[in-house]
Structure formats: C-alpha cells, structure tokens
Image: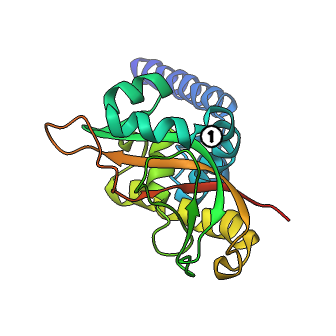
Amino acid sequence: MTALRHSRTRLIGLVLLLALVVAMLLNTKFLTPQALANIGPKPFDPAQTAATLFTKAQTDVASKGKPLTEVLPAVQADIKGAAAKYGAVSPAENSYVFAVTATGIVGDVTTADDIRLQITGLPAGSTILVPTTAAINGTVLRDAMGFKFAEAPGQTQFQYVGDELKKLMQGKVVAPAGDPTKLKGKTVTVTGVIGITASPGSNTVPTAKPVNIQPVKIEVAS
C-alpha cells in the first residue's frame, strides 16, 4: 500500500512538472537570430553617422553662419568674446569652431589644392583658403555639429566619423564646384566652418594666420 501511495505521488508530481513545462513553453517567445540582432544594440556605423551629421550641417551651418567679415576681425581681437557672441563650439580648451559665410573673388594663386579668396572688408594680410583636397578637415565639421567623443565606441571610430565627413565634403561640395584652377577671377560664395585655436595664455589670433573655411556649400557665380 505504501509503495502504491509513493508511486501515485510520483506520478502526480510528474504530471504537475509536465504541466509546468508545457505552460512555460506556451508562454515563451522564441526569436530567430535576425530578431535577436534587431533588438540588440546597433553596431556603430561611422559612415551613417557622418551622413546624418552632414545632412544636418547643410541646414544648421547655413542658418547659423555669420559673415566672415564680421567674425574674423572679432576673433583676431578677442577670440573668447567672439565665441560667446557668435555661438562658437569649443571642442577643446582654447579651440573654437565658428559657422561662417564668405563671398570673394578667386585669386590668381589658387591651386588644385585650395581656393584662395580675396574678400573685401577683412583686415589687411588675412589669408582665406577653401581647401579642396588633403586640407579638407572633416573633424572640424564633426566638432561644429557637436558630436562628442563619448558618442563613439572609441578613438578610432571617433576619427572615422571625421574621415567620412571629409569624403562627403569632397564628393558633395567640392567636386560639383569644378576644377579650382579654372575658377580664377570668379565670384564664389562659401558656407562652412572655421576652426581657430588660440595660443595658450593668449586671447587673440594673429592676422597673418591663414584661415581655412571647411565648406558645406560652394556657389560659383555664372
């Protein structure tokens, strides 16, 4: 009798366990590898990040850009004051990025590497360049858009965002403007950003220091 009672107890236990397993299976959602990938954290994509920043820059820089003839003299006299007045981004100590617009005549010394603009209203000795090849600096535009190191998985990916922006600037901004050496004497309007770094302990920038406008838009007058 005791053995029968124990067998009956074990049977009931097995039935209950089976019922529990069935209930768990019915309430469990099984995911495919693709579904698991979709709900997990997305891998960081420097090219996609750069494309998003570039699209935003074309609108933001155009709306925030101030005439270079206003910004540059203010920067040369008092960079911190100019940064506050014109809403510059400061990615590092003594480093500032300003959104600007500039219209000038393409000078005779323009090369395939840059467009040299002669702009009325700037301090004498000011050299204004629009880089078209190696000197294009996507990191300046990255910083201007407020993309921070903490938003990338590491230093390499952070740098890659700048590299991808450089490619976009070359392909979508510089290339459509045509051969820089054939622009001499033409009126060109540039919208872009300038990165300015003041010497430690100094709040001014030498007039003779060349200024590179990293372009997000170049318009050549016909």
Q: Residue reaching furthest left?
A: 201
Residue 211 x/y as whole percent: 43, 55
Q: What residue do we see at 43% from left, 38% from top?
A: 73
Q: What residue do we see at 62% from left, 40% from top?
A: 61
Disc 1 crowd rating (10 Å Cα; few below 14, some 14-19, many 20+) is many
Q: What residue do we see at 64% from left, 47% from top?
A: 52
Looking at the image, is 99 positioned above or below residue 114? above
In the displayed structure image, the side of residue 4 where residue 57 appears, left or right: right
Residue 193 seen in this snapshot: yes
Residue 72 x/y as whole percent: 45, 41
Residue 168 seen in this snapshot: no
Q: How is the image coloured?
A: rainbow
Q: Which residue is mark 1?
A: 61
Q: Front-most of 35 and 57?
A: 57
Q: Residue reaching furthest front?
A: 124
Image quarter (top left, top right, bottom left or bottom right) of the C terminus: bottom right
Looking at the image, is 110 positioned above or below residue 142? below
Residue 15 x/y as whole percent: 59, 26
Q: Front-most of 124 and 38?
A: 124
Residue 136 x/y as whole percent: 50, 66
Q: How many marks?
A: 1
Image quarter (top left, top right, bottom left or bottom right) of the N terminus: top left
In the displayed structure image, the side of residue 16 where residue 95 appears, left or right: left
Q: Front-most of 67 and 134?
A: 67
Q: SS for tag 1? A: helix
In the displayed structure image, the side of residue 5 where residue 175 appears, left or right: right
Q: In the rendered image, which quarter is residue 121 located in?
A: top right
Q: What amino acid type should be assigned to the residue bearing mark 1?
A: Val
Q: What residue do we see at 36% from left, 60% from top?
A: 156
